[in-house]
Image (cartoon, helix red, strand yellow):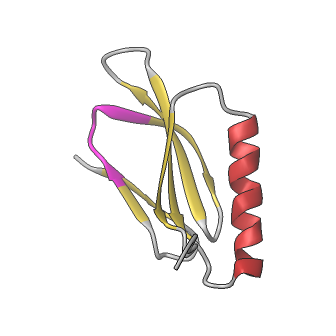
Amino acid sequence: MQNSKVIQSAKRWSFWNDNGEESDYNDTIQQLTINFKLRSTSERFKVTTVYARCSALERLELWEDLEDIASNNTIPWIVGGDFDAILDE
């Protein structure tokens, strides 16, 4: 059986198998963060999937969300997705 979540904008989906048990999640227009516990152990980790808005101004909310998650995080965390941010030509 597969489990899934989708961010509010419906542009990013997350799927996982039964080895991971969702403990809670945080969902906004630009990101979905899910806290997991491995069923066979007590190990916990966090996964954030991103689908950022195109405008730099609109992305500020995303960066604030990620900073908030990071400041309150004590478990392993992986972040990935489409950030729409170009660092260099």
Q: Position of residue 25 (x, y in %)?
A: 58, 46
Rendered position, 85 above or below 37: below
Q: Position of residue 52 (x, y in %)?
A: 58, 72
Asked whether 56 or 4 is in front, the reply is 56
Asked whether 75 or 89 is in front, the reply is 89
Quarter of the image for residue 71 reads top right
| Left or right, 24 with reference to 18 | right
Rendered position, 2 above or below 89: above
User: Does 42 appear in magenta?
Assistant: no
Rendered position, 7 above or below 68: below
| Left or right, 56 with reference to 16 | right
User: Does 18 appear in magenta?
Assistant: yes
Q: Residue at x 58, y 73 (%)?
A: 85
Rendered position, 67 above or below 87: above
Q: Residue at x 70, y 73 (%)?
A: 59
Spot the residue most to the front: 89
Q: Residue at x 74, y 34 (%)?
A: 72
Q: Where are the magenta residues, as a range?
A: 15-21
